[in-house]
Amino acid sequence: MKRSLIIGRFQPFHDGHAWLVQDVHDRGRMPVVAIRDTPYDKNNPFSIHERRKMIHGRFGDFVETIAIPDIDEVVYGRSPGWALREVKPPEGIALVSGTEHRKGFISTQRGMVVWITGNTGSGKSTLARALRQYMMPCVILDGDEMRATISSDLGFSMEDRSLQNARVAGLAAELSKQVNVIIAVIAPTAQIRHDIGLHVETKWVYVSRGREPTKDTPYEPPDEIEHLNRVDPLLTPETAALNVAAWLELGE
């Protein structure tokens, strides 16, 4: 099937955008929606992940989505091998305002909390940084940074580890009222992960590589979590992040 590219911010995806996608589809072509990775502000309150979810929630697999940099110009040379086609939607569709649609969303959207668990050296922080691009606006709470700030008074006993995780969970709960939150903190035991759930609702991602557990670095694999994304240890951080983002879009 031939493809047609539709470029936009989609902040949010509304009926005007949907008309363009449907027009392409009705012509027997696959719509490819290129989402500009706009910086977060009051006029661009939705992450790439949220906008993809809006689009696929409406069109399912009848559309492809890709993320592109926040371009403000398209340049093409002579005979580029593809055509430009201007479309003129009906007046009622053409006048749909993204600004009006944003008013309702800004006051109701809450951030998502994703907790990446795994033993020391598993690559949690690296995965968090790779995943961030799919969840803007986003804050990363890294274990080492949390130890140096909100938990600088704590040691590494199991009691202190539990308190450390509780503090991070409480901070995430507050931050998620405004932005998405990715947490890269070990959360080493089933009991600690259970207690985290009392503070904040979170999506769990497990990175299984890293050090083997010892008495100094105890870690219980999160077999007790039913809905869990288990990251293949052979994947690159970039591919793993893409897979996690797709899993999050499905709402699993």
Image (cartoon, helix red, strand yellow):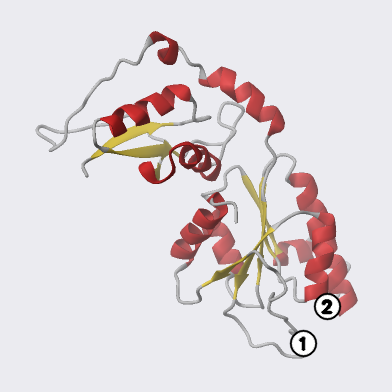
Earlier in the chain: of badge 2 and badge 1, it is 2
Q: Residues within 10 Å of mark 2 (few under 14, many from 20)?
A: few
Q: Quadrant of residue 88?
A: top left
Q: Which circle marks residue 156 in the picture?
A: 2
Amino acid carrying label 1: it is: Asp
Do the CB atoms of the residues marked 2 and 1 lie less than 8 Å apart? yes
Viewed as shown, does residue 51 lie left or right of 140? left
Residue, x 49% and y 54% (percent of image)? Answer: 246
Q: With respect to residue 195, does 173 lie above or below?
A: above
Residue 164 percent across, percent down from the top left: 83, 66
Q: Secondary structure at mark 2?
A: loop
Viewed as shown, does residue 12 lie left or right of 140? left
**Marks 2 and 1, how far apart at CA:** 9 Å
Q: With respect to residue 69, does 147 lie above or below?
A: below
In the rendered image, the quadrant that contains the N terminus is: top left
What is the residue that sits farthest to the left in this orientation? 79
Residue 8 percent across, percent down from the top left: 40, 31
Q: Which residue is mark 1?
A: 216
Residue, x 22% and y 24% (percent of image)? Answer: 85
